Image (cartoon, coloured by chain):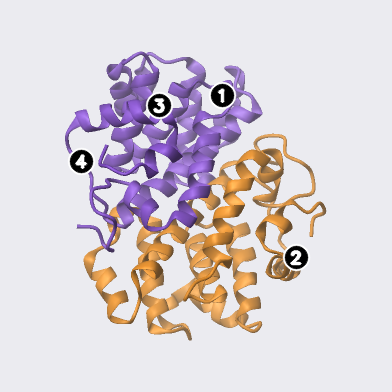
Chain colours: A orange, B purple
């Protein structure tokens, strides 16, 4: 049971977002710029960063839904998402993405863990300043989301199919529309 | 030196915010709802939550500027802010605030650290669902900001007077205007 009284039937971040629409609005705007906006990183790649940070923070709701959205954008390839969750250095992703995920993992630990060597590795593999910036901010944003979801003790569905279905809705409609649409799916 | 090329002369979060105004806009909207919007917690109390989480994350820029803003709103009382940074259970703040800071400290560690007992303590001391929600989200938001500021290796001024001067500008004009106003102060 959640730590505060949230609207019933809305799992994960959606309960607190419906409870407090004033804060949900800018949060959805931020995630839409970061994950859906124009970028030289694909939607699937950006969702992998969100997924990886959420796994490291052990936030089941977030890594399940963003992992499902990542897989949706990567042609339904759930195995690459699972591999990123467990050991991204051996996943079938670009070397640049591995360097960006390494930075995201450092951000998850704390900002000061990011080293010049981490940045240099990414840059050598072609990462731009904007890609490095967005990687750091996506990682930091999911450190927020993971704490928001688990710190309020929200409901986490267990059925993987729940997340696969939601992923299609989010991919088609964006975060703001999907989050605030009534109904568990 | 910052890890990416940021506009010169803007310390802390202001450099990355000027670098990426598309993400700065919703971030400033969120912080303004949380720290400046209508609330049964005072502006000083909410800044104390931001300060305490930033100290725990060892983010010098964030705990210095939000500590200075907290002191500004608490009648210039810097000693209560210093006490919250070091040992809030013995600070001259309300028992309810101590319970909320305890929750914020758990959120800083990770969302799952928050227990029913932490929530019950706050509730017994009069905390409402909205106050608990906002405490969790302020704490989570500063886990984002601290990582954003330090993960990009931004410039951190050392002079305490810098933060005292900035605090007055933020208190008078709000975050969005203060962050995006050119000039180091």
Tag 2, which secondary structure? helix
Q: Residue B157 carries which label?
A: 4
Quadrant into which the N terminus of chain B falls: bottom left
Residue B102 appears in the rendering: yes
- Label 1 environment density (alpha carbons within 10 Å; few <14, some 14–19, many ≥20): many
Q: Real-space Cα distance between discs 3 and 1? A: 28 Å
* Marks 3 and 4 in Cβ contact (< 8 Å): no
Asked if both marks, 3 and 1, belong to the same chain, the answer given is: yes
Residue placed most toward the observer, A89 or B80: B80
Chain on which label 3 sits = B
Mark-to-mark CA distance, 1 and 2: 34 Å
- Pointer 3 with pointer 1, Cβ within 8 A: no
Pointers 1 and 2 within a single chain: no
Task: Give the Cα distance between marks 4 and 2.
Answer: 48 Å
- Coordinates of residue B117 in the picture (x, y in percent): 57, 30
Contact flag, marks 3 and 2 (Cβ < 8 Å):
no
**Looking at the picture, do discs 4 and 2 lie on one chain?**
no
Residue A19 at what x, y percent from top left?
A: 70, 39
User: Closer to the N terminus: mark 1 or mark 4?
Assistant: 1
The residue that appears at 30% across and 31% down in the rendered structure is B166
Residue that mark 2 sits on: A162
The x and y percentages for residue B179 are 38, 42
Q: Can residue B114 be seen in this view?
A: no
Give the residue at mark 1.
B122
User: Which chain letter goes with mark 1?
Assistant: B
The CA span between labels 1 and 4 is 36 Å
Of the residues tagged 3 and 4, which is closer to the observer?
A: 3
Answer with the quarter of the image where residue A68 lies: bottom right
Q: Marks 3 and 2, how far apart in space?
A: 45 Å
Task: Tell me the tag on residue A129.
Answer: none
């Amino acid at each position: 049971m959640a730590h505060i009284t949230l609207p019933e039937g809305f799992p994960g971040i959606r309960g607190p977002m419906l409870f407090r629409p004033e804060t949900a609005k800018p949060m959805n705007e931020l995630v839409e710029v970061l994950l859906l906006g124009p970028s030289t990183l694909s939607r699937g790649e950006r969702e992998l960063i969100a997924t990886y940070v959420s796994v490291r923070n052990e936030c089941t709701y977030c890594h399940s839904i963003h992992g499902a959205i990542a897989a949706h954008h990567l042609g339904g390839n759930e195995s690459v998402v699972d591999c990123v969750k467990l050991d991204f250095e051996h996943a079938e992703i670009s070397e640049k993405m591995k360097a960006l995920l390494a930075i995201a993992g450092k951000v998850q630990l704390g900002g000061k863990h990011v080293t010049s060597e981490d940045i240099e590795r990414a840059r050598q593999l072609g990462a731009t300043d904007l890609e490095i910036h967005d990687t750091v901010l996506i990682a930091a944003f999911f450190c927020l989301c993971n704490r928001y979801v688990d710190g309020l003790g929200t409901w986490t569905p267990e059925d993987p199919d729940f997340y696969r279905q939601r992923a299609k809705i989010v991919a088609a409609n964006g975060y703001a529309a999907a989050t605030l649409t009534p109904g568990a799916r």
